[in-house]
Every structure is written in structure tokens, then in C-alpha cells.
Amino acid sequence: MPTPPNALQVLRTDHVSVRNLLEQLYDTTTRAVKRRRTLLEDLGTELRIHARIEEEIFYPALRDAARKEQQRFMVQALERLHVIERTALPELEHTEVVDTAFSGRTKTLKEMVEHHVEEEEGGMFALARQLLDEDRLAQLGSRLLERKEALLQEAG
């Protein structure tokens, strides 16, 4: 029986999924109305669920284990995540898929997500490995997956 993914593996899988959706969306044209709408809906769901599990489970666990000076980086990462989730994504979702601004807003969101992922996988994951042992990372991985499943069911 394979070992369940730990927290870092769960989040990395989400990052790959979100980046893939953004890449596909960015590569569409104004003629691909139905495809753009489907990709945008999937992206919105994935991104919001990812943000929720990070905000509710991953970052609080990391913050609890960190020293005060390490917590500053977590606050900054969460703020960037909030801008993505509460500003850039809604702006894109409220843009008509045939509008010329749609591609530009997709690119902006894509760049913001890529920056967040690089920051997280480059810094936060290393910090998590430093502060949390393998058992704790495995427990968090299970919690993240459970919460993600519940949020997916809520989203329909």
C-alpha cells in the first residue's frame, strides 16, 4: 500500500494542477468561449480550495512551530495569496472571455501564482521541513486531503 502524501506533496500537486489550468487558459483564444469558461471555472475552484487549505491548515501549523522572525515570511506569503484569491481571480472571473483584457488578466494571474509557488516551494517548504518532522508533515497531508475533499463536495 503506497504511503499517503505528506503536506508538501499535497500542496505541490495542487501547484502543478493550478499552473496547468492557467497555462491552458492562457493558451486559448477569444474563439474558444466554451473552453475558456470551463477552464476558468475549474481554475477558480482549484485555486480557492488550495488557498483555503493553506490558510486553515498548513500556515497555522507552520506558524505555531516557527519563531517570531520566521513568521514574517508566512504573513507575506498569505497576503500574496489573498491578493490572488480576492482580487486577481475575481477580476478575471468578471471579465468576459471574449474581451481582449481577458488574456492580459490571465497572464497577470498566472505570473502572480507562479511567484507564489516559487516563494512557497523555494522557502516555505524548506522551512516546513526544518520545523516539522515527517510524522507531523504526514498528519498535515492527511488533514489537507480531508479538508480538500470536503471543500470539493461543497463546491459540487
Image (spheres, rainbow, N blue to C red):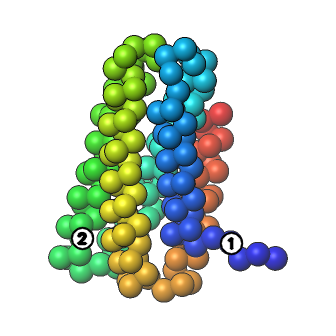
Residue on which disc 2 sits: 71
Residue 2 vertical position relative to residue 13 in the rendered view, above or below: below
Tell me which residue sits at (51%, 69%) in the image: 8
Q: In which quarter of the image is the C terminus?
A: top right
Kind of residue at badge 1: Pro
Q: Is residue 85 visible?
A: no
Are the residues at dot 2 and dot 1 in contact (C-beta closer than 8 Å)? no
Q: In which quarter of the image is the N terminus?
A: bottom right
Q: Camera-side residue: 69 or 18?
A: 18
Q: How far apart are marks 2 and 1 (CA)?
A: 28 Å
Question: Badge 1: how crowded within 10 Å, few (<14), some, or many (20+)?
Answer: few
Question: Residue 78 in the image: x percent, y percent?
Answer: 30, 55
Question: Residue 100 in the image: x percent, y percent?
Answer: 37, 16
Residue 4 numbered mark, or none: 1
Q: Camera-side residue: 90 or 19?
A: 19
Tell me which residue sits at (38%, 77%) in the image: 126
